[in-house]
Amino acid sequence: MSNPIVFDTISKEFAGTNRAAVRNVSLEVLEGHLVVLLGPSGCGKTTLLKMVNRLYEPTSGRILIDGVEVHTLKLTELRRRIGYVIQQVGLFPHMRIEKNIGVVPKMLGWEKRRISQRTDELLELVGLPPAEFRRRYPGQLSGGQQQRVGLARALAANPSIMLMDEPFAAIDNITRTRLQDELLRVQQTVRKTILFVTHDVEEAIKLADEIVIMQEGEVVQYDTPLNILSHPANDFVAQLTGANDLLRRLSLQPVATAMLPWTDEGRPITHKITPTTDLRTALGLLMSDNLEGLTVVDEAGHPVGYLTLAAIRNLTPRPSEETSGSAPSRHSTPDTQYLETDT
Ligand SMILES: Nc1ncnc2c1ncn2[C@@H]1O[C@H](COP(=O)(O)OP(=O)(O)OP(=O)(O)O)[C@@H](O)[C@H]1O
Ligand SMILES: [Mg+2]
C-alpha cells in the first residue's frame, strides 16, 4: 500500500516570477494522519496544497494520491476523493445550507434521498442540528457556523483526503478553539488523511500528528510537534515554533514521562493526576496549589507514581545542555517515534 499523499520532488514556478514558489518538495503523508503545513506568509503553503487538487499544475515533479498520479485522474474523481476547506468558506450565498452541502454528491449523481440523509448526518457531525439549519441561507449563519458547514460540505462525498487552508484563521479565539476541538473529535470518528495549513503555531501543535515546516518554498523539517520543539532543525525552526518555550514542550509530554516510581506506601494520597495528563497542566496544579507533589493514579485509582517539581525539572534539559542541530532534518517520512524516554 502506498501512502495516501506523496509529493515527489515537486516544484512550482509561476509565470513571470523568477523564484520558485515551491522548490523540490518531497513528502509522504501517512494514512489517517493530520499533517500541518506551517511557515511564514509567502513560503508556499497554499501553492503546495493547490497542486494536490490541481487548482495549480506543478512545473516539475509528481503528486500521487493512493499511488495514482493526480493528473491522470478526472477532475470529478479528484473532487470525490479530496475534500477542500478554505478560510473564506466559499458557500454559495443563494443556496440553502442543505444544497450547499449536497453540491458534490449531486455532481456525482447521487439520489435525492441519499443526499438528504447524508446532509443530516453531516450537520449532526459538525454540531448543527439539521432541523434548525438545513433550510437557512449562509447569510443567516455566524462565521463559525458557516465554517462548520464548509467542513460538512468538504466531507459530503466521504473523501479519504482533506485539504484545509487556514480554515479557522478568520474566526475569534473562542470559536476557533471550539472548531479545533470539533475537528479533532470528527477526525477521531472519520479518520481522514488531512493536510492543514496554518501560521498559528499553537494551532499546529494542537492539531498535528506531524508538522511540515516550510521556508521560501522548501521543506525545512518534517516531524512530530514534540520532536520539532525538542530538536528544531535550525534557528529558523526554533524561532518560528518557539521551541525554547518550556511550557509549550511540557504541554506535549504526559505525566508518565516524568513521574517517579510509587514506592512510599505511607505517602498521603491527596492530589491525584492521571499518567496521560500533560505536564503543563500538572505543573499548573503544583504551582497554583503550592503542592509538594501529585499522586499519579491509574484508571482504577491505584497509585502508580509520584510527581514533583524536581521530577519535571529533571526531565527538561537546561538551555545550555541542549544540542542544536542534532536531529537530522527529515524530508521524506515523519518520525513517528513520539517519546524518547519512558520510565
Ligand atoms: N497565482 C500566482 N501568480 C504568481 N505568484 C504567485 C501566485 N500565487 C502565489 N504566488 C507567489 O508564490 C509564493 C507562495 O505563495 P503562497 O500563496 O503559496 O504562500 P502561503 O505560504 O500560502 O502564504 P500565506 O500564509 O500568506 O497564505 C508567494 O511569493 C506568492 O507571491
Ligand atoms: Mg496561503
Image (cartoon, rainbow, N blue to C red):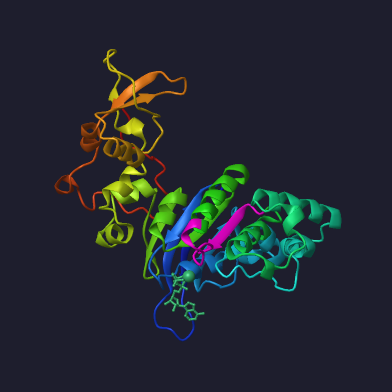
For residue 116, side relative to residue 7 (left or right): right
Q: Position of residue 179 (x, y in %)?
A: 54, 54
Q: Residue at x 55, y 67 (%)?
A: 87
Magenta extent: 159-174
Q: Quadrant of the C terminus?
A: top left
From what the image shows, is residue 296 above or below residue 74?
above
Q: Residue at x 27, y 17 (%)?
A: 267
Q: Nearer the viewer, residue 250 or 17?
A: 250
Q: Is residue 40 something one can see in this rendering?
A: yes
Q: Is residue 3 something one can see in this rendering?
A: no
From what the image shows, is residue 241 above or below residue 44?
above
For residue 259, side relative to residue 338 (left or right): left
Q: Residue at x 56, y 50 (%)?
A: 182
Q: Position of residue 298 (x, y in %)?
A: 42, 23
Residue sticking out furthest to the bottom: 16
Q: Position of residue 11 (x, y in %)?
A: 46, 70
Q: Is residue 160 magenta?
A: yes
How many marks are shown on the rendered structure?
0
Residue sticking out furthest to the top: 265
Q: Residue at x 75, y 66 (%)?
A: 96
Q: Quadrant of the N terminus?
A: top right
Q: Position of residue 68 (x, y in %)?
A: 61, 57
